[in-house]
Image: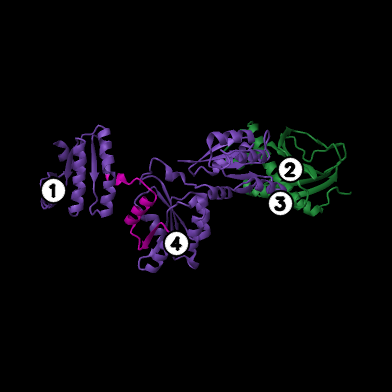
Chain colours: A purple, B green
Amino acid sequence: MSKKCLTVDDSKAVRMIVKKAFTDFDLEICEGTNGVEGLAAASKENPDLILLDITMPVMDGIEMLTKLKADNSLKHIPVIMLTAEAGKETVLKIAKIGIRDYIVKPFSEETLIEKVGRVIDLRPISETQEKRRKLTDPLNIMLVEDKPAIAEQFRTGFSYPSWKVNVVSSTGEAIDTAQETQQDVVIISLSLPHDSGIELFRILRSNPRHKYTPIFALIVKTDTHEQARAQDTGFTNIVTKPVDFHELETKIANAANLDTSEKYFMFDKDYLLISLPENPSNHSINEVNGFLREKITKAVDNGFRKVVVDVHTLEALNMNVVKFMLDAMKYCQELTLKCYVVGNERIDQEAKAFEESKGWKVFTSVEAALET
Amino acid sequence: MSKLILIPEEELVGMMVSAVQDVFTTMLSMQVDLDRHESSMTSEESVPPAYNSNNPMIAANVGFSGKIYGMVYLCMEASLALKLTQQLLGMGELEPSDHEMVNDALGELANMTVGGFKNQLSHKGYSCQLTIPSILRGTNFSVESTSQSQRETFYFDTEGNAFVADLFIRLGD
């Protein structure tokens, strides 16, 4: 459930700035233009935090804070003052009433996010979106690497053109880039000088904006000591050099919670096509299995009558694949869908070697299967 | 000329310049420099406008009262006010007729500027509270002071645009 923040300020400009600062976060902002409206909104909305100005017409912030803290049903709501009024006497007076923090105007967006992030758990909006992003949707990846050759590999290594790799070569540049544009994934080379990769990880993690951003460590494959250190530091995952981009894509998709189903499932005119890669790992089989029931149910909802499982590119039919196909056939049967297997002569022979699959009819093309 | 406020002029100038620069750099990401500064004492007569222009003008003013009283007018051409509003809110083109938005943004910029200045006064023992901002629009207006006060006029430049911070200040009764 979204967190809620009430901003009480007589200036519409300030309320707009507050709203804009949190557009990347799953934080609902409600507003009040003076203390009276603020108290009413606090009762009605029960916010997780109040940002409160002092100098306002009708009822000022100090009076509102006093009334709020005297009300048993509202006094638990944490308050951060956001005000140009920072005289010593005023600050002491307010501190005695009870506040969580004090932000003096003028204020930067970063300060606001940082201080609010200390009071409530700010989550990036992308994490909480009901609709998961697809593999082919745009993705911002920041690579922090000072070696041009490796940077070039990353620029051209991914198979999804919509994945944009922003290469930066220093920690300062990385912090600026991450501040300017929300990054979906950050990859930090731990071979940066002076151990600055680890330091950068800590700086990014301490910022609420990047608290949940997947951050990978890029390390030489044989350097197990450095890999262990990266794990202890808390990196989301480790990428080893030389980089296997297929494996990295899978790691990124998992870390960024992308919907990878389109790698395996396609809804065509009147049938659902399920395709397995030529050499599926256990991870791939588990991944495709995770979508199986949902996709077959969706096929029924779409009015489809047929499901085609295409394994013609498989290097070898093994028991894991057979079990997966049995699951697909079982779900289809439960929902009265016809399920067809498409392969080739070799697959047909291999299927006959297993007790569970020896009775399968293996078609040589999708068209041939659909004609039946 | 005897001053009412026992703060050295250099310090007072520094306080106002830092208050203005703090707001412009933090909220607007804009460079601002002091062109010149004038100091005078007002009588009960009207005070000549610090800034003359045939173009529409806007002045946002915020006061402070307590152990010390004062009023600061941020005075500029309406076109600059529009530009500052767009910059503050990160918005595209605003209509020049959108007075409500510009008034609000300018009022807030004045509030932050005077707040920064006033907080420095408080740290020097002159504790006081801010007033709510108000806005004046017109092409030729002057300010009248009901009692003698010290006037400090600061002429600023921001990226080729001029504006004035006009401070009227006197000790509390």
- At label 1, counting other C-alpha atoms closer than 10 Å, the crowd grade (few under 14, some 14-19, many 20 or more) is some
**First along the sequence among labels 1 and 4:** 4
- At label 4, counting other C-alpha atoms closer than 10 Å, the crowd grade (few under 14, some 14-19, many 20 or more) is few
Q: Whole-percent x and y of residue A338?
A: 17, 37
Say which residue label 4 marks: A233
Q: Quadrant of residue B94?
A: top right
Q: Does dot 1 land on a helix, a strand or a loop?
A: loop
Region rendered in magenta: A235-264
Q: Residue furthest front?
A: A72
Could one spot residue A343 in this view of the protein?
Answer: yes
Q: Are marks 4 and 3 on the same chain?
A: no
Quadrant containing the C terminus of chain A is: top left
Q: Does dot 2 land on a helix, a strand or a loop?
A: strand
Say which residue label 2 marks: B129
Tag 2: residue type? Answer: Gln
Say which residue label 1 marks: A357
Quadrant containing the N terminus of chain A is: top left
Question: Which chain letter goes with mark 2?
Answer: B
A104 is higher (above) or lower (below) than A338 = below
Tag 4: residue type? Answer: Thr
